[in-house]
Image (spheres, grey):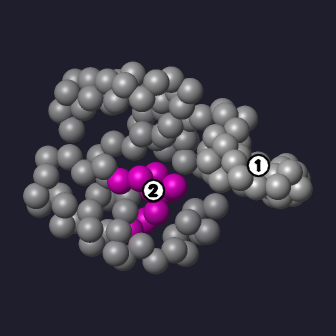
Amino acid sequence: MSESVNQYDITEVVRAVKSARTKFDYVLVDFPFGNRHNSLASLINLTVYIKTPLDLLLARQILRDYSTSKLTDILDWLKTYIRIARPIFLTNEQFVSSSADLILDGSSSLPSKVDFVLKTLQRDKF
């Protein structure tokens, strides 16, 4: 999978992170492959993976993207999800979480996730 990740040209992301690091103490980057892209890995001090149960992710996506759609559109997406998307999500989860420094429960509240990360940053002095 690492070959697949490194095929993406993330030059602009790397440039933005380098620039931000000169201005800020902490730079947060939302990147689907965590620290697994060779161009970005050396710039990351802490990788946080938010592990959210796939059923919760699917429910949130349907509510967000299909709230005004026809039932047939929703059913078509669910068929695609089962056949194609879910296996990809599972593979990506294993790939990214295996190198994460912290794994958070995606079903917990946002304040508790933020609190946990802040305490880790303070404790480990990143």
Q: Position of residue 98 (x, y in %)?
A: 55, 41
Contact (CB < 8 A) between labels 1 and 2? no
Left or right of 87? Residue 67 is: left
Q: 104 and 82: which one is in front?
A: 82
Residue 3 versus residue 98 in the image, above or below: below
Query: Real-space Cα distance between discs 1 and 2?
Result: 19 Å
> Sequence-wise, which precedes: disc 1 or disc 2?
2
- Residue 80 is left or right of residue 54, and the answer is right
| Residue 72 located left or right of residue 92 | right
Disc 1 designates what residue?
A: 86
Label total for image: 2
Secondary structure character of the magenta stretch overall: loop
Residue 116 image-quadrant placement: top left
Residue 29: where, in percent of width, then height?
A: 35, 53
- Residue 43 in the image: x percent, y percent? 29, 58
Q: Residue at x 38, y 58 (%)?
A: 41
- Magenta highlight on residue 51: no
Check disc 2: other Cα within 10 Å, few if <14, some if 14-19, many if 20+: few
Note whether 40 is above or below 117 in the view shown: below
Residue 124 visible in this rendered orientation of the protein: no
Residue in the image at 76% along x and 55% along y: 69
Q: Residue furthest left?
A: 23
Circle 2 — which element? Answer: loop
Can you say which quadrant of the picture contains the N terminus? Answer: bottom right
Residue type at mark 1: give it. Answer: Arg
In this view, 35 is above or below 108: below
> What secondary structure is found at the residue carrying circle 1?
helix
Q: Amino acid at mark 2?
A: Phe
Q: Which residues are magenta?
A: 29-39
Residue assigned mark 2 = 31
Residue depicted at x 54% and y 41%: 97
**Percent x, y of residue 82:** 85, 49
